[in-house]
Image (cartoon, grey):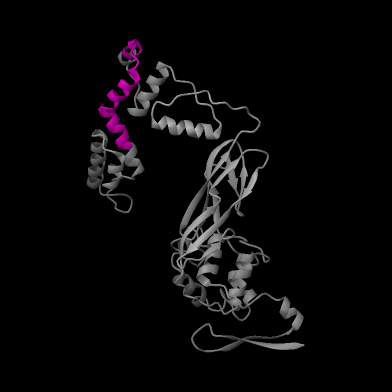
């Protein structure tokens, strides 16, 4: 049995025109892709651009685009992207008459010169999504449903034995309450590939012992999963080190979790040098060294910490550290920094907070 297919294009305006007339046998029609589910431009096509890196800052997502074509950075403007794809270079980037000859597809496959090289293969789901979208007339669904959150499942991994790989799943939650597996559409990176790396399929591979985080990005969201790689075939026994404060309790708990023995207690000389450099950025004088070494009281270390935190050098060093973190930079050219006077006032305020030992939560809130 043969059927004549006459596909009409209602893509631009209200004019319908035939796209293709062809003959298909019933068997081949049944074997064809399911064309009833038209890919959503915003929920299916845009994520392909994100996954392939097309709308990244180093490619078409740059402010001026690349090679004459621009996409919004990471897809923040789907309406603009749709216009540039379908209304600029009409019939070339998107060819609804001969979909597989669209430049969008040919360049992504590397069949024509493309400075970005091949982005995916013709048998990939990414190619299939774009092709089916173009075959359907490249519609803009103007979807109001948006991504509201993503999650990695599981969000904690512990490698203890011979198992060295584990696959993660990325789930996206949408504004209508639905969820979707976007593992194949997310981007991945590792905070420390030496401890644990993650490939583009979301498979984590354990490395050397330690702890790190792997991350997944989708839409405008980034989330992470903790990965712990424990040493293999190592006898571990906690030496019974006692905590002196709640920070020690947290550190000891993490060391136990990672099966790491705590370092030996620093001697007085080591402690003195480290403390001066950490709190003031300078080394102790000869007199300060002799005074500390001659002190035989049990509380001399705690006493010295309090003394150094009262010094001007402590306020100077830590105000500078915070200013670097907060990007406080004075420059007469507003494009490259804040006004010099405003930057100086900001730095002086930070130093005052450090000098007055302002609680960090208050320090953050008032900014």
Q: Looking at the image, is 50 positioned above or below residue 243?
A: below
Between 163 and 39, the one nearer to me in the picture: 163
Residue 20 in the image, given as x and y percentages of width and height: 65, 85
Q: Looking at the image, is 339 positioned above or below residue 306?
A: below
Residue 22 in the image, given as x and y percentages of width and height: 70, 85
Residue at horizontal 56 percent and vertical 31 percent from the top: 259
Q: How many marks?
A: 0
Between 236 and 106, the one nearer to me in the picture: 236
Q: In the image, 165: left or right of 41?
A: right
Give yes or no for residue 300 being in the magenta stretch: yes
Q: Looking at the image, is 304 positioned above or below residue 294?
A: below
Residue at horizontal 33 percent and vertical 22 percent from the top: 302
| Residue 104 figure quarter | bottom right
Between 76 and 330, the one nearer to me in the picture: 76
Residue at horizontal 31 percent and vertical 37 percent from the top: 320
Q: What span is in magenta?
A: 291-320
Main secondary structure along the magenta-highlighted residues: helix
Residue 67 in the image, given as x and y percentages of width and height: 52, 65
In the rendered image, which quarter contains the N terminus? bottom right
Q: Looking at the image, is 58 positioned above or below residue 12?
A: above
Residue 227 in the image, given as x and y percentages of width and height: 55, 43
Between 276 and 116, the one nearer to me in the picture: 276
Give yes or no for residue 95 being in the magenta stretch: no
């Amino acid at each position: 049995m043969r059927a004549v297919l006459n596909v009409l294009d209602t893509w631009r305006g209200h004019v319908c025109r035939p796209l293709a007339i062809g003959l298909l046998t019933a068997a081949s029609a049944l074997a064809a892709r399911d064309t009833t589910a038209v890919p959503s431009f915003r929920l299916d096509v845009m994520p392909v651009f994100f996954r392939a890196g097309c709308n990244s800052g180093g490619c078409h997502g740059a402010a001026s685009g690349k090679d004459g074509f621009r996409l919004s950075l990471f897809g923040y403007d789907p309406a603009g992207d749709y216009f540039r794809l379908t209304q600029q270079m009409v019939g070339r980037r998107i060819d609804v008459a001969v979909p597989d000859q669209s430049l969008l597809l040919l360049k992504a496959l590397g069949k024509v010169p493309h400075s970005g090289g091949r982005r995916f293969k013709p048998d990939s789901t990414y190619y299939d999504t774009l092709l089916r979208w173009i075959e359907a007339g490249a519609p803009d669904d103007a979807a109001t449903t948006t991504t509201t959150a993503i999650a990695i499942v599981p969000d904690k991994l512990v490698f203890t034995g011979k198992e060295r790989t584990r696959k993660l799943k990325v789930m996206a939650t949408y504004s209508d309450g639905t969820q979707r597996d976007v593992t194949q559409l997310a981007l991945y990176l590792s905070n420390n590939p030496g401890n644990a790396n993650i490939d583009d399929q979301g498979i984590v591979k354990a490395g050397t012992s330690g702890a790190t985080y792997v991350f997944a990005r989708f839409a405008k969201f980034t989330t992470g999963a903790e990965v712990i790689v424990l040493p293999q075939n190592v006898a571990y026994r906690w030496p019974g080190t006692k905590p002196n404060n709640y920070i020690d309790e947290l550190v000891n708990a993490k060391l136990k979790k990672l099966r790491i023995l705590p370092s030996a207690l620093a001697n007085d000389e080591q402690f003195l040098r480290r403390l001066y450099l950490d709190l003031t950025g300078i080394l102790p004088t000869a007199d300060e060294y002799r005074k500390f070494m001659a002190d035989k009281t049990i509380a001399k270390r705690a006493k010295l910490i309090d003394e150094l935190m009262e010094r001007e050098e402590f306020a100077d060093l830590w105000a500078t550290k915070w200013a670097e973190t907060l990007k406080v930079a004075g420059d007469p050219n507003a494009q490259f920094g804040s006004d010099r006077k405003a930057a100086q006032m900001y730095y002086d305020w930070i130093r005052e907070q450090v000098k007055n030992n302002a609680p960090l939560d208050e320090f953050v809130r008032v900014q």
